[in-house]
Image: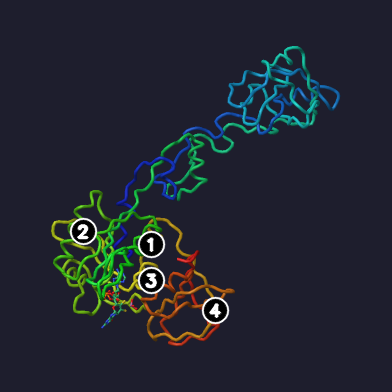
Amino acid sequence: MRSLLAGLPGALGSETVPLPAALGRTLAHDLAAPRPLPSFANSQMDGYAVRAADLSAGPVPVATLPVAPPIPAGAAAPPLPPGHAAPIMTGAMLPAGADTVVPIEAADPPAFPDFVGGGESYRTGTTVMLPASFTAGTYVRPAGSDLPAGETALSGGTRLRAAQLGLAAALGLDRLAVRRRPRALVLSTGDEVAAPGTELAPGQIHDANTTLLTASLAEAGWDTTTAGICADNAPAFEAALADALAAAPAGIDLVLTSGGISQGAYEVVRQALADHGIAFGSVAMQPGGPQGAGLLALPGTDPVPLLAFPGNPVSSFVSFEMFLRPVLCELLGAAPRPLVRAPLAVDLDKPAGKLQVRRGILEDGRFLPLGGPGSHLLHALAQATALALLPADPGHLDAGTDVSVLTMGDPQ
Ligand SMILES: Nc1nc2c(c(=O)[nH]1)N[C@H]1C(S)=C(S)[C@@H](COP(=O)(O)OP(=O)(O)OC[C@H]3O[C@@H](n4cnc5c(N)ncnc54)[C@H](O)[C@@H]3O)O[C@H]1N2
Ligand code: MOO
């Protein structure tokens, strides 16, 4: 599977999207800071911008300085006249000459003069007393102190979350180059399978797999398209597959089918694709035994990796979790499901010689199975938050035996 999909990251390329659309996407290339952050030296406090040397120039521990015009945030600060203190607000530009901010609480008086009315008060000789103890650099946020211009702000391959998008926005960027999402074509098969929302004829069931596999892929960061449900008719299936591939203007990176691959008389996927590059066989795993995989080579279409999962919904889900998700995480730089060790809460019997994947929960640190091993048990799967990987041998495991458990977070 890894070799089938190995070309995927290189084939993806990139696209530039607005910041909100970049959430959850992967940054395509290293991003150099186009400007320093902050882009100008500014105040960390509401207070007085001063030269530290002016505070300590006198013999007493308090300096009395004339007040210069105030500097609100968002204004271009005029240079600070020597020996003055300029009222400055948090985030306002530090005036040329100033190197220190004394917070208003440390000043006497500990509140600003009334600036309303154009700031007449300090033109008429207002002074402020400030402690001499403040050293140069106090409460100043120098330009580039968060990130100098030209340095790597974010590395290519970074998953973009709130903090990374916030940084890009602060750097003035409104778009980012992200890796193109891979695209999958999902097809369910079977004469008995009908779309959810439709009435069922006798013998029919609703299609769970299209939704289940599409959602699994979407959770893993894929775009998906579907060709709907294909009947158990090999030529019709092959034609539907070729049409769906031709109809995907931007190309398809992976085809994922479910059903029609085991030992029955109407195994449509196996019958249609065995001569087109797909190998079918069985792995020693339950559920998810029957499998098909290969590079699909249909006449008139570009070769595309194809995985054929078994039709039972839990088999399809487990196949995705065991085979596809780990490879996608590895190739596309996402975190895999956490794998922990936990003791079994109960005795379990299983077929010897097959790795069995049981669905359940971790309760008090122990794995408790929900439902039986059957691959049709969707309700139990929907309650499960953990998959226990019971080793191929032996066939019986006592309660308390430590096993590997994939944790899936919230109930799926
Ligand atoms: N004689 C044998 N029979 C079976 C074997 C075997 O080794 N020898 N393997 C069994 C195992 S294990 C599995 S898993 C299934 C796999 O069969 P297929 O992949 O060919 O799938 P289908 O026969 O088409 O369907 C199996 C099962 O799943 C239901 N199904 C199919 N598609 C959907 C869907 N989209 N949504 C919901 N349910 C679906 C289908 O109705 C069947 O009940 O083969 C066993 N048999
Ligand atoms: O292998 Mo099947 O997938 O057990 O039901």
Mark carried by residue 368? none
Q: Residue at x 25, y 72 (%)?
A: 201
Q: Residue at x 39, y 64 (%)?
A: 325
Mark carried by residue 303? 2
Q: Residue at x 30, y 67 (%)?
A: 207
Q: Residue at x 59, y 22 (%)?
A: 75
Q: Of discs 4 and 3, which sits in the foreground?
A: 3
Give the residue type that dot 3 points to.
Val
Q: Secondary structure at mark 1?
A: helix
Tell me: is circle 3 under 8 Å from ligand 2.
Answer: yes
Residue 50 is left or right of residue 392, and the answer is right
Q: Is residue 310 above or below residue 11?
A: below
Q: Secondary structure at mark 3?
A: helix
In three-dimensional space, the C-alpha distance between marks 1 and 3, rounded to whole angstroms, equals 11 Å
Give the residue type that dot 2 points to.
Pro
User: What residue would you read off at disc 3?
Assistant: 318
Disc 4, disc 3: CB below 8 Å? no
Give the residue type that dot 1 points to.
Ser
